[in-house]
Amino acid sequence: MNAIGLVLFALFMYVFGYFIYSKYLSSKVYGLEDERKTPAKEFEDGVDYVPTNKWILLGHHFTSITGAGPIVGPAIAVIWGWVPALLWVVLGAVFVGAVHDFGALFTSIRHKGRSIGTILGEYAGERARVLFLLLILALAILVNAVFAYVIALLFIKFPQSVIPAWTIIPLALLFGMSVYRLRVNFIIPTVVFLFLLYASIYLGTLFPVEIKGMAGLLGIEPIMLWIVILFVYTFFASSLPVWLLLQPRDFLNGLQVIILLLLIYLGAVIANPQVSAPAVNLSPEGAPPMFPFLFITIACGALSGFHALVSSGTTSKQLSKEGDARTVGYLGFLGESSLAVAVIIACTAGLTMFASDRFTNLYSNWASIKGSAVPAVVEGGANLISSLGFSQEISKTLIATLIVLFAATTMDTSVRIQRYILNELGSIYGMKPLKGKWTASGIAVITSMALVLAKEGGKGGLLLWPVFGAANQLLAGLALLVTFLYLKASRKPTAPILIPLVGVLIITSTAMAMNMVSNFKKGDMLLSFVSGIVLVLEILIILESFRALRAGAVREERA
């Protein structure tokens, strides 16, 4: 099999998904109505609720959901073979992941832009809502802590990415001012600022930035200095109006990612390297079983519960009309899936373009690839891009910058989502301090920093990260459950939601239970305890939901 075969398969399924399946969902399942007033227009405040051009909003949603997940996950998962990885990424995206994102966005806009956790309370009761919100807050804190560490580590490992990663911030601010205050057609600043962003990437290769000296003067490690800088930045970024920084930053990020994806796919088509990795490998050395862990390792790109937080957290508050939800929610996820496919091609075909044994060396066992996933993507992707005439150094800088910018964007959005949830809790329970954006942002940053500091070198989040994959997918199952409950209450078709819902809950519950037992046997009581707590929370939420469903059915019979 050559790389072009993988490209054509993915393209065919994406065309089917967007032009046929998502249309069916829009008209027959969700019943989108452009005449309805969206939360962005009903509660427009110029800060969080801002009606937005769907293409700009698509850029925000795409980059916010993407992060580093669809890069690292597929890069690791191809150790089980490229066939199962590709099938889960493509078919999972079309029939599960994109449906999940689209459904969470639709459900939120039909509930005044509230988060998916808060909405659950309407259909499953107060206890289920509190349990779900606690789970969401815990996952958001974990994401913030780990991504701060990862971004800081990437700044140190790829110092050439520092200049473009920080240059995009003033460019985004100028973009927001140009479009929303000066009323300039967004195409003009798009072209200008995208050119300046790529110029900054070139400058990054000429002037890599290292902060060892500054960190030494302050008496801290370079990685801790970067982490502090990142949290100070996100504190302010999470409270600024979305049109001023978050939207334009994500939009510019999205465009440069699309360009980079086109370069990788074009390189794959032109070079058309042989896929050298095994099609299926059922027993890689040291790896957990393919089922259910392939579906956990590849989260973003096929399905991710974090996306429901973005869909119902920031995106639903910016949708101008209901019809835009199909483009933003469904197509946005397909964009992320296409990045995961590019990663699979880079790691299984691009990696061996100039050294036939490169895949075998990097993927010799589970332990080796867990530390080599990102370098494998950078190297394999750079090989594909270099076939178009770019230098290896520029190609590697482009990909490294992509990873840093995506991770940083996800952290921005995650802190803002945490603020929204705290604001909602403040409104629900009458806790006035939580209603303030600065107070809520401060709590979000402080709790995340506390987890960062739980282990030396900023690795506190990594203590709990091994349970994140399964917990994240459980969150996806619960988000599908909320959409199912709303469709059921609205007497709409539920099969397209119910089928993936059941499958996701079974797979992820199995993985979480296996993690709990495995960690207990290894003597890791912390991870075993956390896995057990998450599993119990999930079971309680499901039981509360079906208790509410049964009670509703009884009321209907009596009526």
Image (tube, grey):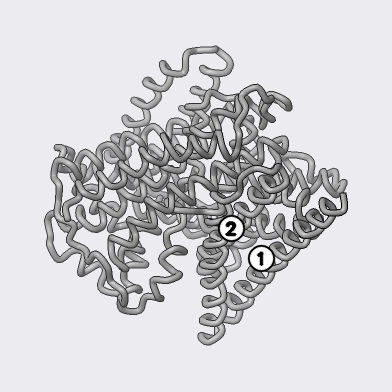
Task: Assess disc 1: are there few (<14), some (14-19) or many (≥20) residues with their C-alpha within 10 Å of its C-alpha.
Answer: many
Q: What quarter of the picture does the N terminus occupy?
A: bottom left
> For residue 295, which quarter of the picture?
bottom left
Q: Is residue 370 left or right of residue 273?
A: right
Q: Position of residue 209 (x, y in %)?
A: 37, 45
Q: Position of residue 173 (x, y in %)?
A: 52, 26
Q: Residue at x 35, y 63 (%)?
A: 76
Q: Gap between marks 2 and 1, in whole Å? A: 9 Å
From this viewpoint, is residue 28 visible?
Answer: yes
Marks 2 and 1 in Cβ contact (< 8 Å): yes
- Which numbered disc covers residue 16? none
Task: Assess disc 2: are there few (<14), some (14-19) or many (≥20) residues with their C-alpha within 10 Å of its C-alpha.
Answer: many
Q: Position of residue 53 (x, y in %)?
A: 53, 23
Q: Is residue 92 left or right of residue 418?
A: left
> For residue 44, which quarter of the picture?
top right
Query: Which is nearer the eye, 210 or 285?
Result: 285
Q: Residue at x 25, y 73 (%)?
A: 364
Please state which amino acid type lies under the numbered disc 1. Glu
229 shown above or below 219: above
- Secondary structure state at the residue bearing disc 1: helix
Q: Is residue 96 left or right of residue 71?
A: right
Query: Which is nearer the eye, 365 or 215?
Result: 365
Please state which amino acid type lies under the numbered disc 2. Gly
Q: Position of residue 510 (x, y in %)?
A: 53, 72
> Reading the chain from its start, which is encountered first: label 2 or label 1?
2
Q: Residue at x 25, y 45 (%)?
A: 7
Marker count (numbered) = 2
Q: Which residue is mark 1?
A: 538
534 shown above or below 213: below
- Which numbered disc covers residue 477? 2
Q: Residue at x 37, y 67 (%)?
A: 370
Query: Which is nearer the eye, 364 or 110?
Result: 110
